[in-house]
Amino acid sequence: MALMKISRVASTIGFMLLAACSLTQSMELTPSPPTPRPTLPQSTLVPTAVRDTHTITTPSPAPTATLAAFDCTPTQDSAITHYGVSAEMQYAKRDVKVAQEIVYTNTTGIALSTIVFNVKTNWQPGIFRLQSIDLADGESLKSHLNGQQLEVKLPQPLNPACVAHINLKFDLHMPPIDIGGPHAYQGYLGYTGRQSNLGQWLPVVAVHNGTTWVTHEEIPIGEQDVLDIADWYVTFRITNAPNTIQIAAPGTSERLSDSEWHFTLSASRDFSFSIGENYRLLQQKSNSGVNVELYTFTDAIIPADTGTIDSAAFALTTAVKSVNLYESLYGDYPLKRLVIVEGDFPDGMEFSGIVFVGSEYFKGLNGVQSYLTIITAHEVAHQWWYARVGNDQAINPWLDEALATYSELVFIEKYYPTLADWWWEFRVNRLSPQGYVDSTVYEFTTRRTYINAIYLRGVKMLAELRATLGDDVFFGWLNHYSSEGSGRIMTPEQFWSLLTPEQLSRTESIRQIYLRKPQIIPLSTPACDSVTTCSPP
């Protein structure tokens, strides 16, 4: 079946730009003011490996579109990128055809002769197939795809504050989830007999750090993403599918027909979702009105001697408690919905507005002292330490992973204070973690050594910082960091810069123990990985 036209919401993007250049108005998230803390119970780029490359030059069709390829209406405001997507999935084959419109504003401060996209789905052969790239006026563009980096050459420089309209067409052939294999943890892009996951399935404009575009090599340890926030308008159609399928997706959702959906997600780092057969949906609102939705399968109902245990209901309660606590500590959750999915792959994974928690944790629930408790609390925390506050996950992974792991402890202290010692022993001490907290993902050969250094030694560092600074200063610091980093990509220098000189001096001995680079150079000017979202701390 032929692809549909870009959805009516996405189609308006170009018209709005032509009419008044309104999309060049600032759309950054407004930082939330610090909120009172409740009393708790006592880049340097990594070289990309040599890979097969191919260059595509598509024939130039006769220009028929009336939409301008470039809009250079003068403006002093910045704008985030807008993605309009129309996709169709042949369910039985797990093949997806995609037409993607990108509206990109050059906020780098320099003229650009190329735009680089990061194509996460091209991490292994046979998944991503580029069909064409052209401007909105129909002019085809030369491009070069090397690993996950898609470099697109522009016919003329894109000057600062100018807007480019670029159209991509590509095919995806979803891989089966590598159950038990080395890539099982990347099951957020793949399928089983009952679930199809489309995690970070869309090419995105790479972050420009002021001198170059940032692309990191994909490895099966940790994450390697550095993502600006963007607006997403996605129309998705599924053909030849059973009538029991449901879509678990963030943002606002409109079902247009039995086989077609439209989604809108604003100011978010990615648009990811899951398709499941016979999902069981449970939902509950947080104290602030966030609708927390949990999609699980029947295996989340566990037989027991006394009847059954509903691990899904337990996970939902854990998630709602997490949202309530983290909002009070770190600031408002920025969306109206939070979606949690039982994933047919190990461990958990975070995206904007949606997280996965591995099915083995649902099946293995044995009271509060279970991985389901701490992994659910961990993944929900990533809605602050990833989705709200961004970082370079390859070079500075501790900025999201150590904070999310420490949030597990904060959750236990608040709701199950007598289990704090259990958490320390079960999660950290029995593994005798070693390694520098400020290591990159490329310095490890196993997931275990990576987790021990980044997550667990990171937790020990944060615990010592809290003991030295005191609860009020420590949690005020995290709240301030969350507020200043909202919608931005932050660096360790910016994290530490929110401490006073006296506080930095008091914590120097802690940094000497845990960090390879413990000395903090004061920021005379704000350091920014992303010009798009840079502002002084």
Image (tube, rainbow, N blue to C red):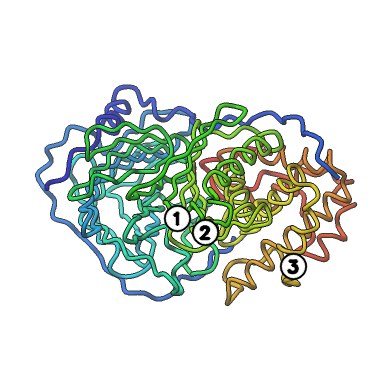
Provide the residue designation for mark 3. Answer: 516
At x 64%, y 48%, the residue is 527
Is tag 3's residue or tag 1's residue first in the polypeptide sequence?
Answer: 1
The location of residue 280, given as percent across then percent down, is 41, 44
Amino acid beneath label 3: Arg
Provide the residue designation for mark 1. Answer: 299
Measured in 3D between alpha carbons, the distance from the residue under mark 1 to the one under mark 2, in whole angstroms, is 7 Å
Residue 8 appears anywhere in the view: yes
Provide the residue designation for mark 2. Answer: 363
Element carrying mark 3: loop
Is tag 3's residue or tag 2's residue first in the polypeptide sequence?
Answer: 2
At x 62%, y 32%, the residue is 332
The location of residue 529, given as percent across then percent down, is 57, 50
Measured in 3D between alpha carbons, the distance from the residue under mark 3 to the one under mark 2, in whole angstroms, is 39 Å
**Do the CB atoms of the residues marked 1 and 2 lie less than 8 Å apart?**
yes
At x 27%, y 27%, the residue is 15
Say left or right for 129 vs 406: left
Amino acid beneath label 1: Asp
- In this rendered view, identify the residue nearer to me: 30 or 283: 283
Crowding at dot 1, Cα within 10 Å, few <14 / some 14-19 / many 20+, comes out as some
The location of residue 121, given as percent across then percent down, is 36, 60
Q: Quadrant of residue 48?
A: bottom left
Measured in 3D between alpha carbons, the distance from the residue under mark 3 to the one under mark 1, in whole angstroms, is 44 Å
From the image, state whether disc 3 or disc 2 is nearer to you.
2
- In this rendered view, identify the residue nearer to me: 54 or 32: 32
